[in-house]
Image: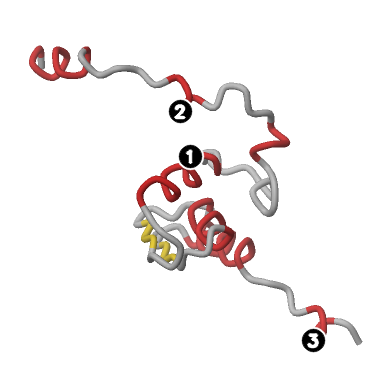
């Protein structure tokens, strides 16, 4: 335990990852503000990680898909994604957030 504490104490804290300056409006754009969800993280985290570690067209996999933040940001950034979650409500929310509306089909 002490070894782990020693290792973590040597890590330099990078305050820009806190996104403390972001308002609710800035984190709820596109479909991100449709609902609340436990343990939901802000889309800026996904965006920064995808920008840093992937390229346009790379597949992003989220094994704990939750409410689809990663799927939405991946789509916005031109990266295909696969998300998995055991919660059927989370799966439904994700599908609603990433499915484009076909206006031609829905206007009669």
- Residue at x 44%, y 65% (from the top left corner): 81
Q: Is residue 9 left or right of residue 23?
A: left
Quarter residue 85 falls in? bottom left
How far apart in space, not on screen, are marks 1 and 2 (Cα)?
Answer: 7 Å
Front position in the image: 2 or 86: 2
Q: Position of residue 91 (x, y in %)?
A: 51, 63
State the residue position of label 1.
45
Q: Residues within 10 Å of mark 1 (few under 14, many from 20)?
A: some
Q: Position of residue 1 (x, y in %)?
A: 10, 17
Please report whichever mark, 1 or 3, sits nearer to the chain's N-terminal start: 1
Q: What colouring method underlies this structural image? A: secondary structure
State the residue position of label 2.
17
Q: Which mark is residue 85?
A: none
Q: Is residue 22 above or below residue 76?
A: above
Q: Is residue 23 above or below residue 70?
A: above
| Contact, mark 1 vs mark 2 (Cβ under 8 Å) | yes
State the residue position of label 3.
105
Q: Is residue 102 above or below residue 9?
A: below
Please report whichever mark, 1 or 2, sits nearer to the chain's N-terminal start: 2
Q: Which part of the image, by quadrant, shows the C terminus? A: bottom right
Of circles 1 and 3, the one toward us is 1
- Residue at x 54%, y 58% (from the top left corner): 77
- Residue at x 38%, y 66% (from the top left corner): 59
How far apart in space, not on screen, are marks 3 and 2 (Cα)?
Answer: 42 Å
Considering the numbered disc 2 on the image, is that residue within a helix, a strand or a loop? helix
Of circles 3 and 2, the one toward us is 2
Q: Is residue 96 left or right of residue 49?
A: right
């Amino acid at each position: 335990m002490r070894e782990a504490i020693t290792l973590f104490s040597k890590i330099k804290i990078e305050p820009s990852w806190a996104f403390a300056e972001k308002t609710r409006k800035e984190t709820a754009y596109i479909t991100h503000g449709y609902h609340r969800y436990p343990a939901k993280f802000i889309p800026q985290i996904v965006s920064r990680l995808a920008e840093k570690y992937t390229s346009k067209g790379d597949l992003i996999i989220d094994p704990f898909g939750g409410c689809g933040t990663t799927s939405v940001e991946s789509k916005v950034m031109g990266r295909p994604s696969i998300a998995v979650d055991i919660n059927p409500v989370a799966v439904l929310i994700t599908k609603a957030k990433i499915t484009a509306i076909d206006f031609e089909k829905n206007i009669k």
